[in-house]
Image (spheres, grey):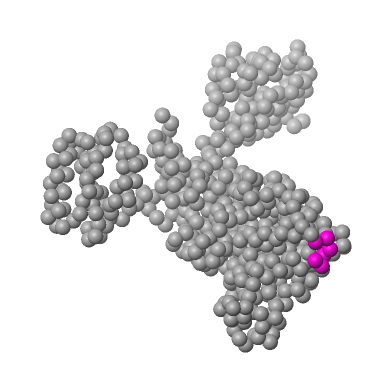
Amino acid sequence: MTENTQDNTGKFVAVCKRECETCAMIVPVLRQIADHEIHLTVYTQDDPDFPEGLSDVLDDTGLEHSWRLDIETVPTLIRFENNREAGRVAGWDRQQWRRLTGIPDLGEDLPAFRPGCGAKNAEPGMAEILAVRHGDLRLSSRRISAGAAEDEIETCYARGWTDGLPVVPPTELRVVRMLGGTIRRPDEVIARTPPNLIACTVEKAAINAVMAGCKPEYLPVVLAAVEAACQDEFCLHGLLATTYFSGPVVLVNGPVRRAVGMNSGVNVFGQGNRANAAIGRALQLIIRNVGGGRPGEIDRATFGTPGKYGFCFAEDEENSPWEPFSVERGFAEDTSTVSLFAGGEVQGVFDQQSRDPESLCRTFAACLRAVVHPKIPMSADAVLAVSPEHGRVFSQAGWTKADVKAKLHQLLQLPGRDLVRGAGGIAEGVPEDFIDADLPKFRPGGLDIVFAGGPAGMFSAILGGWVATGAGGSQSVTREIKS
Amino acid sequence: MKDQIFLLDPTAEQAPAVRARPARPGSFEGLCVGILDISKARGDVFLDEIERQLHDRGIATRRYKKPTFAKIAPPELRQQIAAECGAVIEALAD
């Protein structure tokens, strides 16, 4: 800066607005600069007649120039040399203005310093509007017109884009704002989405995230969920096509839970939290719209579940007596992750009497045995969501999560004679060959435990899994959430 | 009146941008055909002739009438036609 102090041959641009008191105060300064035969162009953000008494005042009420100049504060004075910016001052700082202009007595009668005001182009939401209007961000998705008299929410219905509930119409402005939630490029392919194995770009995910009701800050979670759901081991195509109830269930761990305000407590699987609802729904809309997975077409569920509108929740890591699920999966505690399970039938576990871990584990085992069918082992995985009141029973006794899992594994060795077809007067069951065997209810690694739920209620919950599990079906997947 | 709104297509864009019309029935076999008079002058003349020709071919019809051509059909009428017919013919012009 110093070497330019006496060089006043450059061109200057000032940006100001009438409603800013500092701008009004420095009008004589602008005239003083112009009087020095310095080329000064003034852009005015709110009133084309302001400031008076200057020859080169340009109307920038549309804010294009302010946006291109990346103005944050008015007044801002910028010096250009050879069409390149050579320095700028924001607000009124007499020393700096003198240095930039090379005019030693500039603003002699004014106070030495006055902060400026926020520029109009920097008002909340304005940057994206101006980026859509003037920027070079080019989104590649097809534009679908909705007539002037048409309700654009109905347009989305008519196009078959919704899950039955209204969606937020994905205008370009909303999508650009959504894309502000990630540093990833709009054209980056995040996954090939079943069933049609369509390349899902960040842009397509963002459009569906808008429709689902996401805030931009949820987008990284949505992107990670799509990536996880589209891993081969998760077997999304089969999960989508099944006649069974299941759909993808999203568990979120790590700092992002609190950052975006996810629910891990009261009514954790229920309605009412925007992040839980919108992130889960965004994944389902991407499967529907990008992948082409629609009910009655490739989705052949006999019943489905309400969770197929979207099923996403956070683990209550703060109150858990155990390590977070993501840590169990090998991630650091300060790493945010999504984990995808295939399932989602919520089965309640009621036990208000057990005060010791042995008894409570027997309750869990009795209820877990009923997953899919009490006589069918190793058919589906399950997630046991332990509530705070049940978790306390284990923490007071010093039981780790591994202790609970080991006990449940022991209690869920089922005698073949109780499971074979015809046993108990029930035709369903395992083949007669297993009559003398003990069979585990869950395959190794097929039972996961998470901690969630409201503080009151001696209940836990079982999320029953899909009836195709392990290498031949779906395996849960955990992925890091990146920005 | 608001400006025309453009939405970004959330799909894989494998279907045409212009929304496809519902598929037309391949034949009238077993269908009841609704004859909808929109209450425009002389529309009934045209519809009477259509209906006569359908009857000549052994095709069942049901007759409906909108209260006024100036407004879209009331929901009850639309639901009734959808429930009772496999196709509907209406006369638009004077």
A323 on left or right of A215:
right
- Say above or below: A408 vs A42: below
Give the image quarter of residue A6: top right
Identity of the residue drawn at 67% across and 66% down:
A382
- Report whether residue A219 is seen: no
- Report whether residue A464 is seen: yes
User: Where the N terminus of chain A falls, by quadrant?
Assistant: top right
- Residue nearest the viewer, comparing A341 with A36: A341
View extreme (front): residue = A425
A7 on left or right of A233:
right
Magenta stretch encompasses residue A358: yes
- Residue nearest the viewer, comparing B89 with A4: B89
Magenta stretch encompasses residue B11: no
The picture places residue A134, in percent across and down from the top left corner, at 52, 36
- Say above or below: A244 vs A168: below
- Say above or below: A381 vs A424: above
- Residue nearest the viewer, comparing A4 with A436: A436
Magenta part of the chain: A354-359
